[in-house]
Image (cartoon, grey):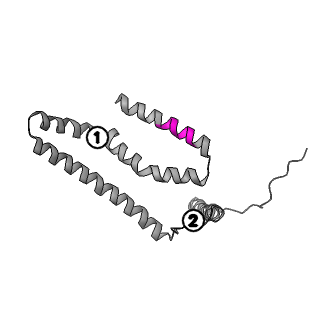
Amino acid sequence: MAAFVASRVLGLARDVVIAAQLGTSDAADAYYAAFCIPDTIFLLIAGGALASAFIPTFADYWVHDDKTEAWRLASGVINLLLVATAHKIARIFYFMLKHRKPFHDIGAEAYGQHEREREVARLQKKAAKLGFTLVQSSDQPAQVSE
């Protein structure tokens, strides 16, 4: 448990350093996208109930000289994790295809504009559910008079 907590604290420190170095750039987005799947797998294995159930069971089989059953258990767990990971990747691709997200770089400005439009649409739906209407303000920044 202490190793898991230490790992999460070091991970937080890593994220702070990366955020300080990369800011909100495209490189930071690429890093976080690439790191998502390995981090999820680590959380499933090291931090979840899987580790607390798998390791004692595997060790028990191993100590009692039932190595065939121990490896069968390990194989089943690894296969389950691979299927879960493949399912997650398939859902990501499905989402990309469903929302017609391009597989090529459309440029940071076009991507930012697209994301702003999606966020405004989402906020308009939420406001409508609450009985409000969003009104577009001017694009000019507020002038401060002294």
Task: Name the residue: 57% across, 62% down.
Answer: 122
Q: Amino acid at mark 1?
A: Ala
How many marks do you count on the picture?
Answer: 2
Q: Position of residue 57 (x, y in %)?
A: 17, 38
**How far apart are labels 2 and 1 at the CA level?**
39 Å
Q: Main secondary structure of the magenta part?
A: helix
Name the quarter where the N terminus is drawn.
Answer: top left
Query: At label 2, which amino acid type do we have?
Result: Asp
Identify the secondary structure beneath mark 2: loop
Q: Farthest top residue? A: 2
> For the point 56% across and 38% down, which residue is it?
17
Percent coordinates x, y for residue 25 in the rendering = 61, 52
- Residue interval drawn in magenta: 11-18
Quadrant hosting residue 105: bottom right
Residue 74's mark? Answer: none
Q: Residue at x 9, y 34 (%)?
A: 64
Q: Which quarter of the rendered picture does the C terminus lie within?
A: top right
On whether residue 14 falls in the magenta region, the answer is yes
The answer to whether 129 appears left or right of 41 in the picture is right
Q: Where is residue 143 shown, x and y percent of the image?
A: 85, 51
Question: Quick one: label 2, few (<14), some, or many (20+) residues within 10 Å?
Answer: few
- From this view, report whether residue 68 is shown above or below residue 82: above
Quarter assignment of residue 58: top left
The residue furthest right is: 146
> Which mark identifies residue 49?
1
- The residue closer to the viewer here, 104 or 73, is 104
Q: Earlier in the sequence, mark 2 or mark 1?
A: 1
Q: Which residue is mark 2?
A: 105
Find numbered disc 1 in the image and state the secondary structure of the residue it sits on: helix
